[in-house]
Image: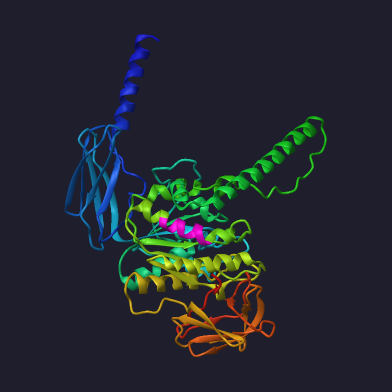
Amino acid sequence: MNRNALLSFALFSIGSLSAAAEVRLPNVLSDHAVLQRSRPIHVWGTSAAQETVTVTFHAQTATATANGDGDWELWLRPEEAGGPYELTVTGSQSSAPLKRSDLLVGDVWFASGQSNMEFPLKGFTGAPLLNGDQEIAASTQPKIRLLRERHRTSPVVQSDAQDTWTLCTPETAKDFSAVGYFFSRELMQEEHIPIGVIDSTWGGTPAHAWISGEGIAYADLPSVAKDAARIAIDQGRADALKARYALDDAALKEAGKEVPTHGRISYDHYGSWTPSTLYNGMVAPFTKFGIKGVIWYQGETDTAPERAPYYARVFPALIQDWRRQWGQGIFPFLYVQISNFGHVNDGWGLVRDAQRRTLELGQTGMAVTLDVGNHNNVHPSDKQTVAHRLALVARESVYGEKVQGESPTFMQATQEGEAMRVWLTHATGLHSDMNPMTEFEVAGDDHKFSPAEATIDGETIVVRAVAVKMPRYVRYAWNGGVDCYVYNGKGLPLGTFTSER
């Protein structure tokens, strides 16, 4: 290499090192972000090793020193709702301050799950949103900010999000989670504060993909390990079939022969179904960022026979794992009991009942959506009602409003002669459009359930079946598809339950 080339290379290297040393912030601390109110504000980033970094925000100033790898972090004092504000980061060795503008302070909700949470305002093919065009046209909401994280799987924990905050406009909202948007709109209107919502979702994914490796080990979930092995085997077979088709097709093309149309290989989701891959890629990057809580809509994929019996352990493990990873205490975790859909198998009942039982964890809340489901489409169009019920739970249990957000909920079942009496909470004004009511079943000591008839008696339900003279157990809405709904006086429906232990 000649002298001029060496000089050019040296200048390029110095320039690269200088650029690399500039102070940086993660994508979640972008323009238009919402910072969580009433708790210490975490600010972190990278710079040159040992560089002194100064952050200013709304009359606050704090300083940190980067470690040997160039990582730094600091905490600002809690702020009340307000803005817009500017955040400035100055590095002692950086060429210019780094600024973030139009930041609001309010409440941040992390929206996650599979396709019914991912379902955007513009809907899916074959599954439009109820009043979708009108909702999109009315979605300019200056006090709502959106961050939609793109799909990403990863075998290792990622430290930075792929995407940044945006204003809430028809252009950005149309691709955003409808449930996340409607939930944030109601909270913004009722609580009169800015709301930020992060949409980190992936359709058709099982819960175990969203749990960290540490969380799976901590909860001791052998069913997840077994399922992971099965997924790897099935995906290997699918990959081998695709490779064989590719070789056969190449040989036919070379011989000048027609290439046949192959049947669809349906099994092609190894990455997004592998335990922890979605946590690593789409949850971990946000765990340093302050949030108010989580809203979750998932479970349809876990109705499969190999997963449904274990959801009662897997789902609580996910909640406890996320709370550990965020390190913000027992924050609110609100979720949807999956809707009614026309499948006839025990998996739907098992998952919905597991979701009910998860209410035993502190600071959880469940929105029941049996009556807004669609027997013929797993993606019901009425996401407004789903989000409203989630928001009611939040308004009552998180924000302390005097509204009723809880559906009638199973408490206990007692035997009365040849009948079972079902005792419920939040059951004032209990009623149904059907009398006698269907969708109830009872079983004796053999645990074999038979269809039963049910009638309302005050705030309880009495259930009996001619075929079961000595009933011991009762359950409701156990199949995927449901046609009979029971409501309390506030119009909130009873969810799936079984009295079996």
**Closer to us: 277 or 164:** 277
Q: Position of residue 202 (x, y in %)?
A: 52, 54
Where 431 falls versus 60 (above or below)? below
Decide whether the magenta segment is chiefly helix, strand or loop: helix
Q: Position of residue 218 (x, y in %)?
A: 44, 50
In the rendered image, the quadrant that contains the N terminus is top left
* Residue 419 horizontal side relative to residue 143, left or right: right
Where 121 falls versus 445 (above or below)? above
Where 496 falls versus 41 (above or below)? below
* Residue 116 horizontal side relative to residue 334, left or right: right
Q: At 43% across and 47% down in the image, what residue appears?
A: 214
> From this viewpoint, is residue 195 visible?
yes
> From this viewpoint, is residue 172 visible?
no
**Closer to us: 448 or 214:** 448
Q: In the rendered image, which quarter is residue 168 located in?
A: bottom left
Which residues are the magenta region? 312-320
Q: How many marks?
A: 0
Q: Position of residue 276 (x, y in %)?
A: 49, 47
Q: At 44% across and 68% down in the image, what residue appears?
A: 359
**Closer to us: 416 or 393:** 416
**Closer to us: 428 or 419:** 419
- Chosen colour scheme: rainbow
> Is 137 a magenta residue?
no
Where 4 falls versus 339 (above or below)? above
Q: Position of residue 137 (x, y in %)?
A: 47, 66
